[in-house]
C-alpha cells in the first residue's frame, strides 16, 4: 500500500475509535451492573467534585432524590470524593516544578527540533 492509501484508511479508523469510545460514566457504570440510581448519583457527584476542585461553582445534586434514595446518595458521595481527589491531583501535578530530567528532556527536544528546522531551510 502506498502512503496515500494508508492515510486514507488511518483517518477514518482513528475517528471511529475516538467516537466509539465516547461513553458516559453513567452508561459505563450501568454496563458494569451498577444500579441506575447509583450510576446517576455517581455521575452527578463526579461533576460536582471536579467543579469543587477547580472552583468552577457547577454543583449538580438532586437533593430530593439524595435524601430519599440511599443508592443515589452513596453514588453521589463516592463520585464527589473520587473526582475531587483526581482533579486535585491533576492540579497538584501541574503546579509541581519540573524535575531536572524533564528540563533536560525538553532542552534536548528543542535542540533536535532546531537542528531539523535548520536542515530543512538549507534544502528549501
Image (spheres, rainbow, N blue to C red):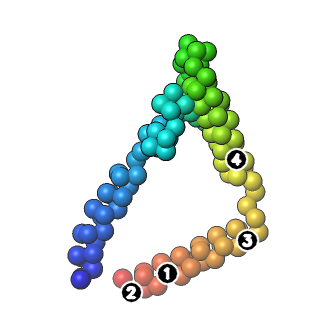
Question: Mark 3 near mark 4, Cβ–Cβ under 8 Å?
Answer: no
Dot 2 or dot 1, earlier in sequence: 1
Structural distance between the alpha carbons of marks 3 and 4: 21 Å
**Disc 4: which residue:** 89
Structural distance between the alpha carbons of marks 1 and 4: 36 Å
Structural distance between the alpha carbons of marks 2 and 1: 11 Å
Structural distance between the alpha carbons of marks 3 and 2: 33 Å
Image location (x, y in percent) of residue 98: 73, 61
User: Quadrant where the N terminus lies?
Assistant: bottom left
Q: Report the disc number at residue 116.
A: 1
Question: Mark 3 near mark 1, Cβ–Cβ under 8 Å?
Answer: no
Dot 2 or dot 4, earlier in sequence: 4
Dot 3 or dot 2, earlier in sequence: 3
Front disc: 3 or 1:
3
**Disc 3: which residue:** 101
**Disc 2: which residue:** 123
**Above or below: residue 56 compared with residue 96:** above
Dot 3 or dot 1, earlier in sequence: 3
Is residue 13 left or right of 99 when viewed as pictured? left
Q: SS class of the residue under badge 1?
A: helix
**Above or below: residue 38 compared with residue 103:** above
Instruction: Tell me the crowding category of disc 2: few under 14, some 14 to 19, or many 20 or more residues within 10 angstroms, Cα based.
Output: few
Structural distance between the alpha carbons of marks 2 and 4: 46 Å
Q: Residue at x 66, y 44 (%)?
A: 86
Is residue 55 in view from this perspective? no
Is residue 13 left or right of 112 when viewed as pictured? left
Is residue 49 left or right of 37 when viewed as pictured? right
User: Quadrant where the C terminus lies?
Assistant: bottom left
Front disc: 2 or 1:
1
Instruction: Tell me the crowding category of disc 4: few under 14, some 14 to 19, or many 20 or more residues within 10 angstroms, Cα based.
Output: few
Instruction: Tell me the crowding category of disc 1: few under 14, some 14 to 19, or many 20 or more residues within 10 angstroms, Cα based.
Output: few
Amino acid at each position: 500500500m502506498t502512503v496515500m492509501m494508508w492515510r486514507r484508511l488511518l483517518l477514518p479508523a482513528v475517528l471511529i475509535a475516538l467516537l466509539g469510545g465516547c461513553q458516559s460514566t453513567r452508561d459505563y457504570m450501568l454496563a458494569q451492573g451498577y444500579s441506575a440510581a447509583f450510576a446517576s448519583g455517581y455521575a452527578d457527584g463526579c461533576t460536582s467534585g471536579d467543579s469543587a476542585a477547580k472552583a468552577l461553582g457547577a454543583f449538580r445534586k438532586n437533593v430530593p432524590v439524595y435524601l430519599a434514595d440511599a443508592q443515589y446518595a452513596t453514588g453521589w458521595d463516592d463520585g464527589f470524593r473520587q473526582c475531587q481527589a483526581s482533579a486535585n491531583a491533576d492540579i497538584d501535578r501541574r503546579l509541581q516544578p519540573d524535575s531536572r530530567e524533564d528540563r533536560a528532556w525538553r532542552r534536548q527536544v528543542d535542540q533536535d527540533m532546531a537542528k531539523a528546522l535548520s536542515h530543512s531551510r538549507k534544502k528549501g
